[in-house]
Image (cartoon, coloured by chain):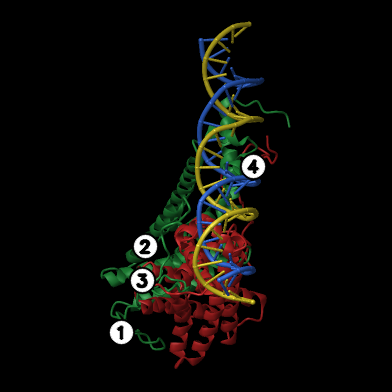
Chain colours: A green, B red, C blue, D yellow
DNA sequence: AATTTCACCGATAGTACTATCGGCGAAAAA
DNA sequence: TTTTTCGCCGATAGTACTATCGGTGAAATT
C-alpha cells in the first residue's frame, strides 16, 4: 500500500470516475430517486460541495451517465453486426442473433436495468433516451427481418414486423433479467428458449402475405381488419361525482 | 349544475376518491417521484394540509393505492379463470388465454404502467408487490402448462416451463404497451401475434423430454448442462485505481 | 335553538437536498 | 524559491416537501 504519487489531473480524473461509479451503483440499488449529490459524494469519498468541482450540476452528472450508456450501446450494436457476419452456419447465425444482445446485456446488468426502468418511467432523465433506444432496436430487427425476405411492403406487413420485433425485444429482456437474477443460469438454455419462440413468429411471418393457405393443423387465419378495439378509458375505476373531474384551482 | 346537497361523509368520501384519482393520474404522468402531497392535494382541489384528513401520511396513500391495485388484479385473475373455462372451443380457449390478460391490462392502463415501472424500480413502494405479482402470474401459467400435460417432473422441466411462462408474460406486456400506445390498434391482431409466438414454445415443450428426437427441419437439441456462464461483473466498465472500490467514509 | 363534530383552511416547524462561497494546502508553473 | 493554480473542504443560503397545529363554519346531534 505504498502511496501512489498522482498528478493533479490524474487524481481529478480518478475522483470523477469514482463519482460515476458510485452514481451507477446507487442508480442500480435505489433507483433515480436515491441519486442525490449527498449520497454520490459520500459514496465517492468526497465532500458534497466537491461534487461541483466535477459536474456543473446534478443534471450534468445524469447527462454524463446517459452519454456513457449510449457509448456502450452503440459499441454493442457494432459488435453485434460484426459477429453476426462472422457466424459459421445459418443455424449458428440464428442463435447468435439472440446470443449477442444477451451477452451485451449481461456484461452491463446495472446499465440494462437502468434502461428498462427508465423506459417505463417518464420522470426519468433517461426516459426519452431509453424509449428511443428501444425503438432503434426494433427498427434494426425489422430491417433484418425484411432483408431475410419477410414481407414488408404493405403497411400491415410493416406493422406485423414491428410487432414481432417488439416481441423479440421483450423476450430477450425478460430472459436477460432471469439470467442476471440467477434463475436461468445457463445462457445457452436461454438462447434455446428464444430460438423456440422464434419458430412461432417465423411461421407467422411466412404464412402471412396471402392470409389464407394455412397449414393443416394450424388454426385458420383469424379475422383481420376486424372491429378495432375501442379507445381506452384512462380512469382507474375510481368514480367521481357526475360530470366530475379533478378541480384545478387551489384553495 | 344545481348544487348537490351532500352529507358530510359523502363529501369526505368524494374528496378521498378525488385524491386517489389525482394520485393515479400523477403517478402515471410523472412517476412516483412526482407524487407529493402538495401536488395530489392541489389536483384534488383541497389544501395540502387537508391531505392529512384523509391519510395518516404519504405512505398510507401509497398503501391505499397498492391495495386498490391488488384488488383489481385479483378480480382480473378470477375473471380470467372463469372466462377461460367458458370458452367454446380449444382454439378459442387458446386465444382467450392471451386475450383475457390483455383486456384486463387495457382496462387499467395507468395501473399496468405503474406495475411495470415498479417491477424494475427497487425504490418504488410497489416494487415487492409488483415482483410478487409477476411471479404469481408466472406460477399460474406454469401450473396451466403442466396441467396441459407438458413435462414438469424434473427440475430442468420446471425451469423450462418457468422460462416459457416468463416469456409469455413479457410478450403480453410488450404487446399491451403497444396497444395502449396506439401502435397496435387491433387487439385481435395482437392476439394473433401472441398465438404465433406460442406455436414456437409449444413445439419446444413437446419435443423436450427425451432431448434427442428432434423433427426433420429442426436444429438438433443444443448442449444442455453445458458450461454455465460465468458470474456477472456488476461494474459498469468504469475502472478505478488498482484494488480500488468506492470509499465508504465521508470527509 | 343550543351544542358538538369535523372537513377544511392558513401558518409554520422540521427535514433533505441543491448549489454557492471563501479559505486551505499541495501540486504545478514561474 | 516564489507565485499561481486548483481540488478539496466546511459553512450556509435557498428551495421543496412532510407533517402538525389552532382556528372556522357548516353539518350533525342534542
Judge from the rendering whether residue B206 lies leftward or rightward of residue A154; answer left or right: right
Label 3 sits on residue:
B184
How far apart are labels 4 and 1 at the CA level? 62 Å
How far apart are labels 1 and 2 at the CA level? 25 Å
- The residue shown at (63%, 35%) is A46
Q: Which chain is mark 4 on?
A: A
Tag on residue A144? 2
Q: Return the disc, 2 or 4, that comes first in the chain's sequence.
A: 4
Q: Residues within 10 Å of mark 4 (few under 14, many from 20)?
A: many
- Quarter of the image containing the N terminus of chain B? bottom left
Q: Nearer the viewer, mark 4 or mark 1?
A: 4
- Quarter of the image containing the C terminus of chain B? top right
Looking at the picture, does residue B241 appear above or below residue B16? above
Residue B136 image position (x, y, % from top left) = 60, 75
Q: Nearer the viewer, mark 2 or mark 4?
A: 4
Q: Are marks 3 and 1 in contact (CB under 8 Å)?
A: no
Label 4 sits on residue:
A43
Q: Which chain is mark 1 on?
A: A
Circles 3 and 1 on the same subunit: no
Q: Nearer the viewer, mark 3 or mark 1?
A: 3
> In which image quadrant can residue A234 be found?
bottom left
Judge from the rendering whether residue B210 lies leftward or rightward of residue B5; answer left or right: right
Circles 4 and 1 on the same subunit: yes
Q: Residue furthest left?
A: A154
Label 1 sits on residue:
A212
Amino acid at each position: 500500500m505504498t502511496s501512489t504519487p498522482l498528478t493533479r489531473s490524474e487524481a481529478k480524473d480518478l475522483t470523477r470516475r469514482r463519482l460515476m461509479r458510485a452514481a451507477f451503483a446507487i442508480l442500480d440499488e435505489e433507483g433515480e430517486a436515491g441519486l442525490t449529490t449527498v449520497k454520490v459524494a459520500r459514496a465517492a469519498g468526497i465532500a458534497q460541495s466537491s461534487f461541483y468541482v466535477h459536474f456543473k450540476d446534478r443534471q450534468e452528472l445524469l447527462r454524463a451517465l446517459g452519454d456513457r450508456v449510449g457509448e456502450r450501446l452503440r459499441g454493442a450494436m457494432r459488435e453485434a453486426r460484426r459477429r453476426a457476419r462472422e457466424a459459421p452456419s445459418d443455424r449458428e447465425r440464428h442463435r447468435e442473433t439472440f446470443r449477442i444482445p444477451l451477452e451485451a446485456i449481461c456484461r452491463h446488468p446495472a446499465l440494462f436495468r437502468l434502461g428498462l426502468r427508465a423506459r417505463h418511467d417518464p420522470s426519468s432523465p433517461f426516459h426519452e433516451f431509453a424509449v428511443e433506444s428501444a425503438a432503434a432496436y426494433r427498427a434494426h430487427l425489422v430491417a433484418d427481418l425484411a432483408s431475410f425476405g419477410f414481407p414488408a411492403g404493405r403497411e400491415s406487413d410493416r406493422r406485423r414486423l414491428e410487432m414481432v420485433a417488439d416481441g423479440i425485444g421483450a423476450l430477450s429482456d425478460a430472459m436477460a433479467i432471469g439470467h442476471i437474477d440467477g434463475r436461468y443460469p445457463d445462457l445457452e438454455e436461454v438462447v434455446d428458449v428464444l430460438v423456440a419462440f422464434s419458430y412461432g413468429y417465423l411461421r407467422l411471418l411466412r404464412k402471412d402475405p396471402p392470409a389464407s393457405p394455412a397449414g393443416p393443423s394450424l388454426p385458420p387465419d383469424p379475422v383481420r381488419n376486424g372491429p378495432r378495439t375501442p379507445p381506452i378509458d384512462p380512469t382507474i375505476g375510481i368514480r367521481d361525482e357526475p360530470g366530475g373531474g379533478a378541480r384545478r384551482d387551489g384553495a
